[in-house]
Image (tube, rainbow, N blue to C red):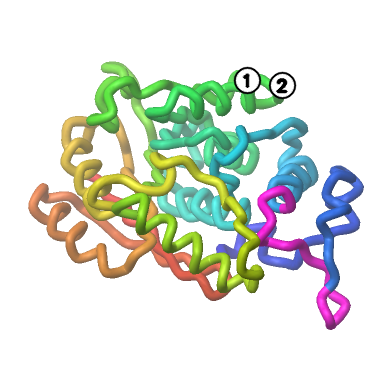
Amino acid sequence: MHSQNIHRKAYNFKSLTEVNPELVPFIIQRKNGEKTIDFANPGAILQLNRALLKLHYQVENWDIPENYLCPPIPGRADYIHHIADLISHENEKGDISGLDIGTGANCIYPILANRIYGWKMTGTDIEETSVIAARKNVVANQNLIDKINIRFQEDRGSIFKGIIGKEEYFNFSMCNPPFHSSEKEAKKAAEKKIRNLGVKEGNKLNFGGQANELWCNGGEALFIKRMIKESVLFKEQVGWFTSLVSRKENLEKIFKQLIKLKAEYKTIEMHQGNKKSRIIAWKF
């Protein structure tokens, strides 16, 4: 993880359960005596997130609708820290403004970006339910109300159009795109995750995530290529465009699109345990 990520160390379950007692029933003990939670249980992850947000980020109220994506906070925080490195020369000036594409019902990136670095954030989503839930998470916390703005993207075929105003400027944009290319592929990945976590057959767990959160036609490669193509129209209004890329094999297609449009770009590697991912960042 990033050197500035406070989640690099093991979870302090004593402190976490003090701020959120509802986490207690979900704590289990490994054979070596270490405490952990059942990461195959969405309820456990929800209560862990609430505890982490309260303890480390002073976010007292956070919730998501049933069956919506419940994001792991350490990895989300890592993306924020890498963006801080990317815009470090601008960060010294203060008044940093960021745009989160597909913020989801959880609104986690805008929340973390504000609580860690004090940035003003705008989140967007194509689902009204997600927009409503994200706004609830903002207004439920007094320290976020004037710092985070959530916008509904009415045109599902657009990413920046209809969101960025004529006089607006964002130091960066960020995105965690849906990386599966079909619902079938998303379900197959969920089943593999269940097997890897050692969940017994027949115990059908829902890891959360609506269709638009998990998959789109063409998967992440096509989504990011669309984003790059549209970003040209807003090259004077966004300092750095960025997106997560979960699959390394998609980079070649993305690079070709960036070269075609004469963008300056770089990739930033991220590591969380055994999981490897990367950020693609570009500007004009």
Three-letter amino acid code at the position of disc 1: Ile
Q: Quarter-wise, where is residue 32 in the image? A: bottom right
Q: Residue at x 50, y 30 (%)?
A: 121
What residue is disc 2 on?
142
Q: Badge 2, how many Cα within 10 Å: few under 14, some, many 20+?
A: few
Q: Is residue 33 magenta?
A: yes
**Residue occupying the far left of the picture:** 260
Q: Residue at x 64, y 27 (%)?
A: 137
Left or right position of 127 against 272: left
Three-letter amino acid code at the position of disc 2: Gln
Quadrant location of the C terminus in the rendered image:
top left
- Point out which mark residue 145 bears: 1
Q: Quarter-wise, where is residue 31 in the image? A: bottom right
Quadrant location of the N terminus in the rendered image:
bottom right
Judging from the image, what secondary structure is the residue with disc 1 in? Answer: loop
Which range is magenta? 30-44
Q: Residue at x 74, y 48 (%)?
A: 52
Q: Quarter-wise, where is residue 204 in the image? A: bottom right
Q: Is residue 21 above or below residue 160?
A: below
